[in-house]
Image (tube, rainbow, N blue to C red):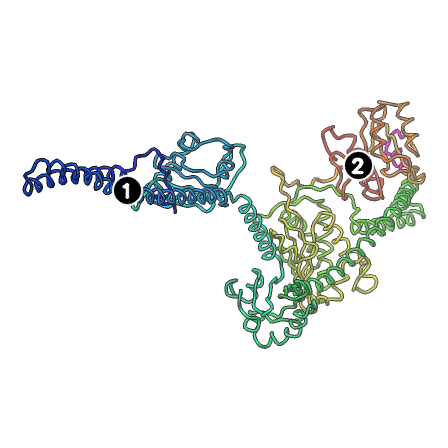
Amino acid sequence: MPTHDLKPAQTASTPRPPIQSQTVRIVGIYALFGLAWIYGSDHFIDLIIDDKGTLLKIAVIKGFVFILCTATLLYFLINRFLGEVATADRERLESLESLSQRNAQLRLFFEAAPASLAMFDRDMRYIEVSRRWLSMYGLGERDILGLSHYEVFPEIPEYWKEFHRRGLAGETIREEADEFRRADGSLQYVRWEIRPWYQKPGEIGGIVIFTEDITERKQFETALSANERFLRLLTDHLPGLVGYWKEDLTCGFANRTYCEWFGKKAEEIIGVGMRELLGEELFAQNEPHVRAVLAGEPQQFQRTLVKRDGEVAYVWSHYIPDLVDGSTRGFYVLVSDVTELKRAEAERQRLEHQLQQAQKMESVGRLAGGVAHDFNNLLTVIMGLAQLGIRELGPEHPTLVRLEGIRQAAEKSAALTSQLLGFARKQTIAPKVLNLNRAVEEMLKMLKRLVGEDIDLAWSPGKELWQVCMDPSQLDQILANLCVNARDAIADIGKITIETGNVSFDAEYCNAHFDFVPGDYVLVAVSDDGCGMDQETLAQIFEPFFSTKEVGRGTGLGLATVYGIVKQNNGFINTYSEPGEGTTFKVYLPRYTEEGAQAVPETAPAPATGGSETILLVEDEPSILNVAVSLLTLQGYQVLPASKPEDALEFARQYRDRIDLVVTDVVMPQMNGRDLVRRLLTFCPKVKSLYMSGYTANVIAHHGVLDRGVNFISKPFTMNDLAAKVRAVLDAKPEEVA
């Protein structure tokens, strides 16, 4: 700490108090000696001599003696004085040299110190300053000695002035890391200290300010801290155990998972020996791998471990040596808990089996849909020709019975293809908002007749049931098929229960159950107390043509149809059954949440009637075209037959607004039915349209659901079906949707 020796040196013009005192002393001695000599010698001579001549001679001699004595006295006095002066000058010179040397050392200290330094007096005027200070605060080569600190930095904040006042009061103040914004806007970190210096013991002469630029160190520390946080965050969020063991087998690092595994805090593990942490048994198992890794050989091994809660875990361990200059200082430990992976592998195998089953069902569905499409075209011709033959022959004609048999067989075949399309999810549907409680109640009488009097059909409706949006005929198919299967599973007397309810599934539940999707659903469950099924049977019940019934009692398409309908409506189905314990089918249909939607009541179909309107009929299959022309002509309509879209466009150019309705197939070689209707509108802007097809096409429907405003009739159709649909489309208002 600076002392009073560091104050400015005295100048050469300052008078020396010792020289003045020495001069006064010499003069005083000389005066006293002279007075004593004159007075004493005269008085003594007067006492012993009376002769004047003798007195004169004695006076002369006395004068020479006085001069000699005074000269001798002055010689000794002046010589002594000059010696003292020389000694004092030498001492003063030595003192000045010492002070100069100390000032040089102080300057060297100021310039060589790693910190910037400035020394101030009590008025905060600069006494000494280092070049590092001038550079650090952007003062260049400016001479600021003698200037006030507040003059050099006029905008210095008040809190710094308070620090200065505290330093001048004798307090030492320091800050290890302080932010400092430079004039160019860059951020600088400094470490500073304010200390008082003393002129003399107890008297403060000013303060010294030490300032060190620690920006690089701070940036390095910040980067190092960020890296440490990153590594800690990374290792703490790794699913496995990460640790480091030193060469003496004491723990140097353990991530959060490592600590949790052993049920300890980090400070309870760091520095602990491996034998103490693992225990004798586990340490003995690990010891061969530890010795090998300390010899520089990486280790990888798998084993089972028992956790603190007693659960058996499967882990995969990696020991990685920490090599520095060829010697091992320790090793890193990476331990992965693969218990869930092993469980997931088992689950994956189970899901793969389910996926293969689903893919098989999808493939069979595509095959069934293609067969049904082609078969429907043939059935349309068969049913049409049979109806035309029945109409042309009289009621007593012997062939009439055969034609009626053909018609009935064709209708049964159509029902079979309808089931195939239902399974393949290619059945065309017109969804409506339904209240399942009301819909089921309307079916109960029919279902009771279906299951018979010996079986108790119980109905348990859910309260405040949500609405669904689906085709009512599909709900009929689901309940009819499930109830028939339940009836056949009951040997004699039993009970079938139908119940509904609201169900919600979250993501966690759906992740654990294949094919489930999170959301709100309406449940329809059909349960029976029949014979039940084993697991092998359960795995095949939704496959088409699979049946446990004897030959002639079923087609094997009932549950396949239910499965297809549920999937087409974005729902899912679960089956619960055990041999001898009965079976429960649970169907989950998505909740319909559009505001303002009301359940639509079913309306009875209008009786089929004919008309006189002009109909453009487009069908690329000649046999279907001929049959449809005949059916429509018998109803009184004027029919323009076209076997390809080009012919239909030519009719449209000729007849234009005289065409009232276009009936067209959906899938045709040159152009699909939807595009054909769009082009026809340029010639017949008011024409209405009716599409026909053997299965749902994405041209007019998405996932089997008809686009809004689309009129559709499914092949095969009867004469009455076609007549009723044509009449309904012709009579509908423009804003109505069929």
Residue 265, numbered label: none
Identity, as a three-letter code, of the amino acid under mark 1 = Phe
Side of 597 relative to 620 (left or right): left
Residue 112 spot, x, y in % from top left: 50, 44
Pick whichever, 53 or 380, lies toward us.
53
Pick whichever, 267 or 709, lies toward us.
267
Within the image, what quadrant is residue 203 found in?
A: top left
Side of 293 relative to 668 (left or right): left
Q: Secondary structure at mark 2?
A: helix
Q: Quadrant of the C terminus?
A: top right
The earlier-in-sequence mark between 2 and 1 is: 1
**Disc 2 designates what residue?**
725
Pick whichever, 667 or 161, lies toward us.
161
Would residue 637 be counted in the magenta stretch?
yes
Residue found 72% across the figure and 54% down from its top = 480
Residue stretch in magenta: 628-639
Residue 81, numbered label: 1
Within the image, what quadrant is residue 459 found in?
A: bottom right
